[in-house]
Amino acid sequence: FGSSQSSSKYCPYVRGACALRMKLVSIIVLLMSFSGVGGTEIQVIGAGFGRTGTASMMLALERLGYKTYHMVKVFAGTPRHPRVWGDVADGVPGAVQVTLDLLAEEGYNATLDYPSCALYKEQMERYPNAKVILTLRKSGFDWARSFVDTIAKNTRLFAKAPFTALLPGLGKAHRWMFERCGMALDPDTLMPTLETAATAYDTWAADVMAHVPADRLLVFSVEDGWEPLCSFLDVADCPGESFPRAVNDKQFMIRVTMFLDFTTRFWHVFWPSVGVFVALLFLCCCCSTTRRKDKVN
């Protein structure tokens, strides 16, 4: 707009439109939460934080026949996933129920990693027969060093373009899930300190072990291998191969974060370039067609 006066003129309308959108979303979510969506039931609930071997555990559970929901599925799934988690982060009434309904609709029977670990209590309440796996690392500081150098940085990145358009709601969901898990985030960097993260990890692990009945809980490290997992899940035919190790070590995740950071910095350069490339390709095709017609004539 031409001036601050003219822009302030429209502020009430903008705020009104945002408030109306939130009310409409709330109504839709409530209607969906009462719809009684069917589908599968969650049998395994992962209560451990990301960077505790959850990707390796996902491979192990899928080897045992489970369809497992992990943060990677939020990216690779339908566009509804980041949106429903954004609604959960916004505190939209009924959003948690709708999110769990979505997992049931899509046939997931196991959950791991962020953001679903932040709702392990809600999942236990909805699925009273489900078993809980708490994946852990050697210590809180061992985990925090890996976390702060990798996925903790993604909260700031997902709150920027182009991810706000490509994955709407994911930035809010990232911030919500870390704060829900007890981490105070710096308002400028949207990151916890190493000490804050380590304390949150230890507190969360203690809370899970206090909340979950012993007969429903497996405290697990990827070094433990197949035997305790198969015994806990009543799997008679335990795999004979080595326990899977996902290719997402710290250095790999650092490279992923660097790529995301690069994307947020230079996406505005690449998108016009794509348009120019398509236009040039179109012109080349047209010129080629014209030359062929001239030769024929």
Image: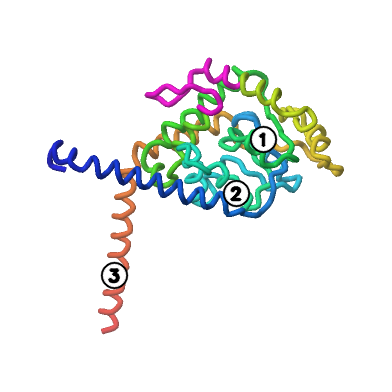
Q: Which residues are magenta?
A: 179-201
Residue 198 in the image: state x and y as whole percent: 57, 18
* Foreground residue among 251 and 50: 50
Q: Nearer the viewer, mark 1 or mark 2?
A: 2
Other-residue count near label 3 (Cα within 10 Å), few / some / many at <14 / 14–19 / ≥20? few
Quarter of the image containing the N terminus? top left
Residue 39 in the image: state x and y as whole percent: 66, 54
Q: For the point 39% across and 39% down, which residue is it?
A: 263
Residue 211, by quadrant, is top right
* Foreground residue among 225 and 7: 7
What amino acid type should be assigned to the residue bearing mark 1?
Gly
Number of the label disc, if any, that sits on residue 101: 2
How much space separates mark 2 and mark 3, taking CA atoms?
A: 50 Å
In this image, 216 relative to 46: left or right? Answer: right
Q: Helix, strand, or loop for circle 3? A: helix
Q: Is residue 274 above or below residue 176?
A: below
Number of the label disc, if any, that sits on residue 46: 1
Other-residue count near label 2 (Cα within 10 Å), few / some / many at <14 / 14–19 / ≥20? many
* Foreground residue among 160 and 103: 103
In this image, 14 relative to 32: left or right? Answer: left
